[in-house]
Structure formats: C-alpha cells, structure tokens
Image (cartoon, helix red, strand yellow):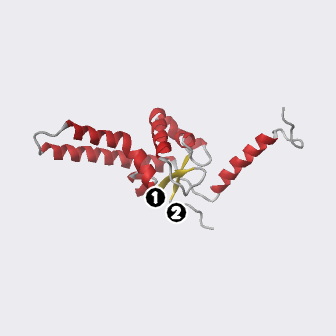
C-alpha cells in the first residue's frame, strides 16, 4: 500500500492523477461552452441537411431510368454513417456545428482535431446512447456529453475566450 501524503486522503499516485485532471480543466477556465439547446440546434441543422441531400438525390435520380442501386446506397451510407465522423475529423465539425460557430476538438488540446478513429467512436457512442448522452451535458462542468467524455473530445465555440 502506498504511503499517504501529509494528512492527505489520497496516495501520491492519486494526487498526481488529480493534478493532471485539474490541469486539463484549467485549459478551459476562460471558455464559454455551448449549451444543450445550442448543440441540439446543430443536430437539427444536420438532420435538415441530410434530409435535403436525400430529397435532392431522389429528385435527380427520378430523371434517370436505370440508376444503379449502388449510387443510392452510397449516398445513404455516407449521409447516415459517414457524414458526422468525417466532417468532425476533417473540419472540426459538421455543417450544423460550423453554422453555429462550434468546433469539436480533443479535450487534451482544444487546437487539435479529433482523429478519424475518435470521430467514429464518438459517433457510435452517441448513436447508441441517444438523448441520454446529450442530457449528461447538464451535469458536466465543461458541458461535455457522455460521447465527448468517452472519445476524449470537447465542443467549444471557435471564438470562445471570455473577454476580460
């Protein structure tokens, strides 16, 4: 068993771990975080965009007699399963995020974009947890949802520093 520090209830390793967490939290001490409603607005904008792409592609395909089902499937698969993770990886957010001035980055360093793997992990966790993940924003100091915590990501504003 590790020795406890001067009257501390934490071991030395636990104290170091707490210090690391505190350092990460300090990165964001001057940030303003998007609210739950702002993030839902971004999700709604993305849903409208996906709908419009489906509607537009159906309209275009109606002009052609024999449209290869591969093209229909490719559009469906991209918009449903690839749109969010690829946009987050390449552009730090979806179109909905961009319109609302939001970006999704690594929690450890808000200037670094998420890896493609982390973006897909975030999407899959968000998809499985659904609204429960979003509701968790209300109970996190940095307004991080469960899928943000699990994928080591954070959603912030592009211009997020509080004016001093």
Above or below for 47 versus 99: above
- How many numbered discs? 2
**Does residue 47 appear left or right of residue 154 in this picture?**
left
- Residue 85 in percent (x, y) is at 42, 45
Q: Residue at x 55, y 53 (%)?
A: 33
Q: Position of residue 51 (x, y in %)?
A: 29, 44
Answer yes or no: is residue 4 visible: yes
Q: Residue furthest bottom?
A: 164
Q: Earlier in the sequence, mark 1 or mark 2?
A: 1
Q: Which residue is mark 1?
A: 101
Viewer-proximal residue among 134 and 1: 1
* Label annotation for residue 82: none
List x then y, in percent, for residue 87.
Answer: 41, 50
Residue 15, percent from left and from top:
78, 44
- Residue 50 versus residue 33: which sits nearer the camera? 50
Contact check, label 1 and label 2, Cβ < 8 Å: yes
> Are there few (<14), some (14-19), or many (20+) residues within 10 Å of tag 2?
few
Element at label 1: loop
Q: Quadrant of the C terminus?
A: bottom right
């Amino acid at each position: 068993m590790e020795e406890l520090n001067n009257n501390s209830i934490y071991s030395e390793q636990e104290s170091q771990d707490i210090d690391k967490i505190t350092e990460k939290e300090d990165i964001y001490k001057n940030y303003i975080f998007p609210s739950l409603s702002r993030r839902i607005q971004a999700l709604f904008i993305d849903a409208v965009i996906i709908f419009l792409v489906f509607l537009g592609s159906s309209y275009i395909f109606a002009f052609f007699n024999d449209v290869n089902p591969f093209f229909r499937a490719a559009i469906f698969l991209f918009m449903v399963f690839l749109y969010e993770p690829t946009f987050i990886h390449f552009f730090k957010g979806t179109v909905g995020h961009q319109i609302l001035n939001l970006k999704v980055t690594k929690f450890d360093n808000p200037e670094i974009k998420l890896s493609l793997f982390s973006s897909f992990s975030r999407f899959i966790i968000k998809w499985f947890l659904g609204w429960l993940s979003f509701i968790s924003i209300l109970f996190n100091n940095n307004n991080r949802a469960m899928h943000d915590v699990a994928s080591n990501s954070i959603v912030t504003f592009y211009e997020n520093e509080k004016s001093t």
